[in-house]
């Protein structure tokens, strides 16, 4: 059982409440926006390889439909619960509004440990989950994508299942697909690329040389792995990274390309067992507290809390993950002058290129990777500028500035549509 302090939905509501108060939103608007519009819980059987049947629980939550079809990933993890999915769906609403793409927010999840499932079990689970949520999902209604422990292959099974039910291919029903079945060039790297752009733009505004920045990345999957490699391509020194197997530190800089190759070839894509001259093993706690210029939490929620915020020794935190910092930690970091580029901005690159994938799929007209990356960069840099300018003008944190911009846009869309008679 989670306590209120580490319940992601309570945290998401608290973040929203602060913005709603500053925006002086009317009570009826607050009441609508602080809870999800639709929630679906499904329980479904999956045939296991040994012939037995197991029942799994899954969720799809649509937080707000005011700005368009809802959008957000699907997470497979043992700790998924309805409050986590609600929070993730709400954060998607603000994220899509902040980068001004025409979506509301949604998220899905299945309570399972994919590391314990064979590929066949994972495929059957995915196909059955897709069927169960088909009543709320669709290319003009709600469009899933990958999140923790889901990947392009899982998205392909999802798309294929919904297409089989319709009798024709509907590839815009899900994004993050393999290129062969309507995926977009650049989607796989998009979230990490967005994170690296935040580091670059912050350094530009602060007049810091990228070569002088020491970076620590927690999480070495889709977001963290790509972010580490693109940040190191910017010229920064990535001195520590970590995943579920622990942390790896080398003050002279890690060989990120070698580490990504290692993880790709090992069970569960983990760094477990990785060693190289000068590389020290550390635990996850020490990883987060490693002195550095930039810390990128890119794993799960609630990593920086009131328990460790005093010991964080970074100048900048760029939230690759959703919800890695609690509101209590936010306060401590702000007092200590540590700048946080919030999740709804920092990791918005993924959903932005998902939007491009959806547009390309609907038009059956595909762009080259340079076009995708160029458009992504324009959107991310412009959102970063808007957030920094508002934060500077009002003397508030980047998180609060991002929320003011995003919540205002969502509230306005809902008001203009006449949803609050
Ligand atoms: N995949 C995407 O496009 C997007 C993902 N995100 C967020 O980024 C975060 C990471 O997602 P992905 O990279 O897609 O997932 P992933 O499944 O590819 O990677 C997750 C990584 O976190 C590590 N990890 C798990 N538990 C850990 C722990 N206790 N301590 C340290 N590391 C741990 C795993 O070993 C793995 O390296 C999540 O918060 C997700 O919601 C946000 C925007 C888009
Ligand atoms: O690509 C997408 O549609 C959503 C990605 C996602 O789940 C997220 O941004 O947290």
Image (cartoon, grey):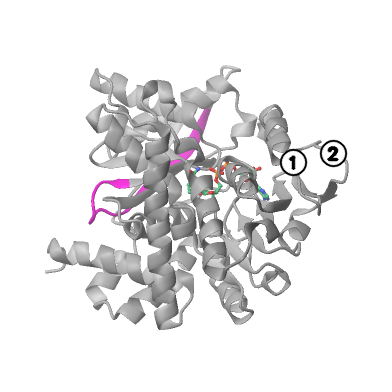
Residue 270 seen anywhere in this rendered image of the structure: no
Whole-percent x and y of residue 232? 65, 47
From mark 2 to mark 1, how far is it between C-alphas?
A: 9 Å
At 47% from the left and 67% from the top, the residue drawn is 10
* Between marks 2 and 1 in the image, the one whose residue lies nearer the viewer: 1
Whole-percent x and y of residue 282? 81, 52
Q: How many marks?
A: 2
Q: Residues within 10 Å of mark 1 (few under 14, many from 20)?
A: some
Residue at which label 1 appears: 255
- Looking at mark 1, is its residue's CB closer than 8 Å to ligand 1? no
Judge left or right: residue 221 versus residue 272: left
Whole-percent x and y of residue 124? 47, 23
Residue range in magenta is 54-70
The image shows residue 12, relative to residue 215, as above or below, that is: below
At 23% from the left and 30% from the top, the residue drawn is 363
Quarter of the figure that contains the N terminus: bottom right
Q: Residue 133's quadrant in the figure?
A: top left
Q: Which mark is residue 276?
A: 2
The image shows residue 309, relative to residue 382, as above or below, that is: below
């Amino acid at each position: 059982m989670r306590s209120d302090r580490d319940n992601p939905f309570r945290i998401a509501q608290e973040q929203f409440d602060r913005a709603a108060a500053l925006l002086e939103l009317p009570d009826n608007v607050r009441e609508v926006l602080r809870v999800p519009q639709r929630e679906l819980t499904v329980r479904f059987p999956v045939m296991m390889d040994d012939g037995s049947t197991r029942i799994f629980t899954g969720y799809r939550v649509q937080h707000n439909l005011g700005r368009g079809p809802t959008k957000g990933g699907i997470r497979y993890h043992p700790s998924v619960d309805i409050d986590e999915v609600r929070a993730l769906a709400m954060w998607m609403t603000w994220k899509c509004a902040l980068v001004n793409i025409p979506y509301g927010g949604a998220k899905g999840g299945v309570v399972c440990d994919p590391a314990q499932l064979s590929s066949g079990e994972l495929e059957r689970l995915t196909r059955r989950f897709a069927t169960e949520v088909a009543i709320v999902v669709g290319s003009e209604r709600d469009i899933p994508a990958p999140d923790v422990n889901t990947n392009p292959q899982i998205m392909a099974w999802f798309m294929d299942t919904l297409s089989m039910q319709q009798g024709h291919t509907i590839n815009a029903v899900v994004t993050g697909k393999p290129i062969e079945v309507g995926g977009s060039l650049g989607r796989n790297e998009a979230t990490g690329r967005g994170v690296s752009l935040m580091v670059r733009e912050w350094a530009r505004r602060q007049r810091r040389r990228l070569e002088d920045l020491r970076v620590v990345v927690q999480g070495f999957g889709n977001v963290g792995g790509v972010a580490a490699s693109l940040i190191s391509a910017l010229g920064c020194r990535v001195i520590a990274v970590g995943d579920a197997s622990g942390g790896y530190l080398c003050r002279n800089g890690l060989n990120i390309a070698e580490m990504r190759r290692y993880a790709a070839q090992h069970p569960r894509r983990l760094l477990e067992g990785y060693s190289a001259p000068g590389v020290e093993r550390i635990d996850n706690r020490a990883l987060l507290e490693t002195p550095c210029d930039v810390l990128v939490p890119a794993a799960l929620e609630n990593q920086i809390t009131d328990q460790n915020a005093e010991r964080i020794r970074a100048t900048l935190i760029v939230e690759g993950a959703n919800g890695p910092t609690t509101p209590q930690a936010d306060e401590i970091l702000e007092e200590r002058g540590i700048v946080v580029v919030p999740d709804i901005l920092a990791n918005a690159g993924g959903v932005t290129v998902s939007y491009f994938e959806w547009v390309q799929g609907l038009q059956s007209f595909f762009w080259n990777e340079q076009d995708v990356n160029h458009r992504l960069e324009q959107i991310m840099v412009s959102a970063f500028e808007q957030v920094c300018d508002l934060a500077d003008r009002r003397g508030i944190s980047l998180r609060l500035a991002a929320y003011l911009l995003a919540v205002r846009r969502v509230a306005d869309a809902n008001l203009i549509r006449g949803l609050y008679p």
